[in-house]
Amino acid sequence: MSEQELGMLFPVAIVDYCPGWPISFLSEKRRLEAALHHIPVQSIDHIGSTAVPGLAAKPIIDMLIQVSKKTHIAHIIDGICKEDYHYIPQPDSPPPHMMFVKGYTHMGFEGQAFHIHVRYPGDWDELCFKKYLIQHPGAAREYEALKRELAVKFRNYRDQYTEAKTDFVNAVCEKARNCA
C-alpha cells in the first residue's frame, strides 16, 4: 500500500484519555513477559501519550522493551510475533532496529492497537518525555493542543504528523534533561 492508502485506512485520530490504557498495557506486558521468558529483558515500559494520565492521544499503546545486547534477535522476533504482532525492521532507528505492531488489519484497526519498540538498554527520550509531561501538566496540555491541531492537518499522513511534533518533543526532552 502507498503511504496515502495507509493514511486513509489508519488515519491520525486523537481521542480523549482512556483510563483503560494503563490496564491494557499491564495485560499486554504480562503476555509479552510470558512469551519472552527465555530472553533477558531489562524492562518493558509504557511510553507515548497513552502513558500520561489525562492526556488525549492516538488510541495506540506504545511500549519500549529493552533487551540485552547479547540477546539473539531471532528469538525476540519469534517470541513477539507469536503474540500476533507484525515485525517491522527499523534500519534508521537505534539498534536493534526493531518495531512490532498489533491491531492493524486490511480493513483498518481491530481491537486495541499496540506498537512495540525494541532497543538495547539506554537513556531513551521516550521515557524522559513521558516523565516530564506527567510532572508538568502545562506542558502536557500544550502537547495535547499541538497533537489535536496536527491530527486535523495531517489526518491521512502519519509520518508528517509525527515529524511536525518533533521540535516540541525535542524541546521538552532538552528541558527534562536540564532539570534532572
Image: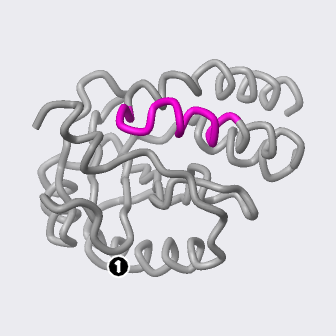
State whether residue 67 is above or below residue 46: above
* Residue beneath the point at 64% across and 18% down: 167
Left or right, 126 with respect to 80, comes to right
Q: Secondary structure at mark 1?
A: helix
Q: Quadrant of residue 143?
A: top right
Q: Amino acid at mark 1?
A: Arg
Residue 152: % across, % down: 53, 38
Q: Main secondary structure of the magenta part?
A: helix
* Residue beneath the point at 87% across and 49% down: 137
Answer whether residue 98 is magenta in the image.
no
State whether residue 83 is above or below residue 92: below
Badge 1 is on which residue?
Answer: 31
Answer whether residue 156 is magenta in the image.
yes
* Residue bounds of the magenta highlight: 146-158
Which residue is more in the foreground, 75 or 3?
A: 3
Please indicate, yes or no, whether residue 123 appears anywhere in the rendered image: no
